[in-house]
């Protein structure tokens, strides 16, 4: 039995990075042997085990054969599989390297060379069999940045997979998982640019219900520089055009994206020039009293996307929050309470505008 460190851990070590996870491939063993050694099985679709002490993942060397549509339509074999056969099934050459426990590098597909050249190249024709890999390549663009390129043959392969409708087989949850990870990488604009170039964000093969903002590059770069949260980055890059896709995204992502879109339609960037009545309608539409954190995230997203001075907007929010609503309601009942509160809100905004004009 031989054990090798594989995949992303080897890639990261060669890049001088500390691997987040360490995955191993075991050659010449069986599932029964791994169990006898105290390893705990965790793989649902293929034999993967957790080390009893380190909890690192150890997988039996395997080959896969495409048997059905989709990224899960495979049969797996582990009998008499060599290390090179296992590595040949991986997505990119930079992820198809192994390292012996003594430190020797096994690199049958030129992954180290591609790391040095900053090239994303598919390992073999097996890339075609898993449409999720198209999104993974775009995510690697987000990780490595504009200095890296996708090799021409791989780019043609990806275009062909998109044109053939292969990505339509993917559950939206898997698509979102890749988008989410890519948005939190150092160069998310590179991922979006790659997806746009493939026609996945526009045209007949586009991901339904999501469109790209025209100024996404600079907005996302500013979002990364400010260490913005995932939902803010998404709102800076995309618009939601369909309730169908909105229901599949995390609620905080959907809520903020739609809130930003409503704020844009309501001309929030021109807030200070609006009359008090229009300001009040906008503030209530954004639910500023009950959702202060979402409102602040909306302002952050708008500031990342546009030149937007938010001092007047924030001062108006604070003025409304400082109203003594319980005191206003004393001695009143029914609709009179609502009417009195609306009067006070409007008076507060009129007073704030007058103070701002006099300053």
Image (spheres, rainbow, N blue to C red):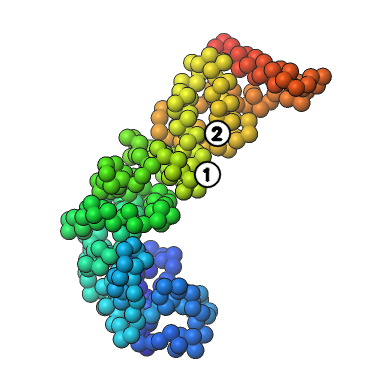
Question: Residue most toward the front?
Answer: 68
Indicate the position of residue 51 as horizontal and vertical percent values.
Answer: 49, 79
Residue in view at x 60 percent, y 35 percent: 291
Question: In the figure, 44 relative to 173: above or below?
Answer: below
* Secondary element at image label 2: helix
User: Residue at 59% across / 31% down in the picture?
Assistant: 287
Q: Position of residue 123 (x, y in %)?
A: 24, 67
Residue 231 is left or right of residue 159, and the answer is right
- Between 210 and 101, the residue placed more toward the observer is 210
Q: Mark 1 = which residue?
A: 252
In x, y percent, where is residue 6?
35, 73
Q: Is residue 315 left or right of residue 261?
A: right
Q: Nearer the viewer, residue 117 or 176?
A: 176
Q: Nearer the viewer, mark 1 or mark 2?
A: 1
Q: Distance from label 1 to label 2 (Cα)? A: 12 Å
Q: Which mark is residue 13?
A: none
Which label's residue is closer to the chain start, 1 or 2? 1
Q: Is residue 213 left or right of residue 282?
A: left
Q: Is residue 190 visible?
A: no
Residue at 46% from the left image edge and 20% from the top image edge: 270
**The C terminus appears in which quarter of the rendering?**
top right
**Mark 2, residue position:** 295
Q: Residue 93: where, in percent of width, then height? A: 26, 66
Q: Secondary structure at mark 1?
A: helix
Along the line of sight, the residue nearer the viewer: 358 or 198: 198
């Amino acid at each position: 039995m031989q054990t090798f460190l594989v995949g992303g851990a080897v890639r990261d070590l060669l890049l001088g990075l500390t691997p987040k996870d360490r995955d191993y491939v075991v050659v010449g063993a069986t599932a029964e042997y791994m169990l006898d050694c105290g390893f705990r099985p965790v793989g649902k679709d293929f034999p993967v085990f957790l080390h009893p002490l380190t909890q690192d993942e150890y997988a039996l060397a395997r080959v896969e054969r495409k048997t059905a549509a989709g990224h899960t339509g495979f049969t797996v074999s582990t009998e008499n599989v060599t290390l090179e056969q296992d590595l040949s099934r991986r997505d990119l050459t930079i992820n198809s390297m192994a390292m012996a426990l003594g430190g020797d590098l096994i690199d049958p597909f030129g992954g180290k060379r591609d790391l040095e050249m900053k090239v994303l190249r598919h390992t073999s024709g097996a890339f075609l069999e898993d449409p999720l890999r198209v999104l993974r390549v775009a995510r690697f663009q987000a990780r490595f940045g504009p200095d890296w390129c996708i090799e021409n043959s791989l780019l043609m392969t990806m275009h062909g997979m998109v044109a053939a409708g292969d990505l339509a087989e993917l559950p939206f949850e898997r698509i979102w998982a890749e988008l989410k990870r890519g948005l939190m990488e150092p160069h998310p604009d590179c991922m979006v640019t790659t997806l746009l170039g493939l026609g996945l964000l526009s045209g007949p093969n586009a991901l339904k219900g999501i469109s790209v903002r025209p100024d996404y590059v600079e907005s996302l770069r500013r979002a990364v520089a400010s260490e913005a949260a995932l939902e803010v980055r998404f709102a800076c890059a995309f618009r939601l055009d369909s309730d169908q896709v909105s229901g599949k995204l995390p609620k905080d992502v959907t809520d903020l994206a739609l809130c930003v879109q409503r704020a844009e339609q309501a001309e929030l960037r021109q807030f200070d020039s609006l009359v008090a009545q229009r300001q009040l309608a906008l503030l209530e539409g954004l639910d500023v009293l009950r959702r202060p954190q979402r409102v602040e995230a909306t302002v952050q997203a708008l500031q990342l996307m546009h030149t937007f001075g938010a001092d007047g907007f924030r001062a108006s929010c604070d003025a409304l929050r400082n109203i003594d609503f319980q005191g206003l309601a004393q001695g009143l009942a029914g609709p009179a309470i609502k009417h009195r509160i609306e009067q006070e809100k409007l008076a507060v905004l009129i007073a704030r505008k007058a103070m701002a004009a006099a300053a």
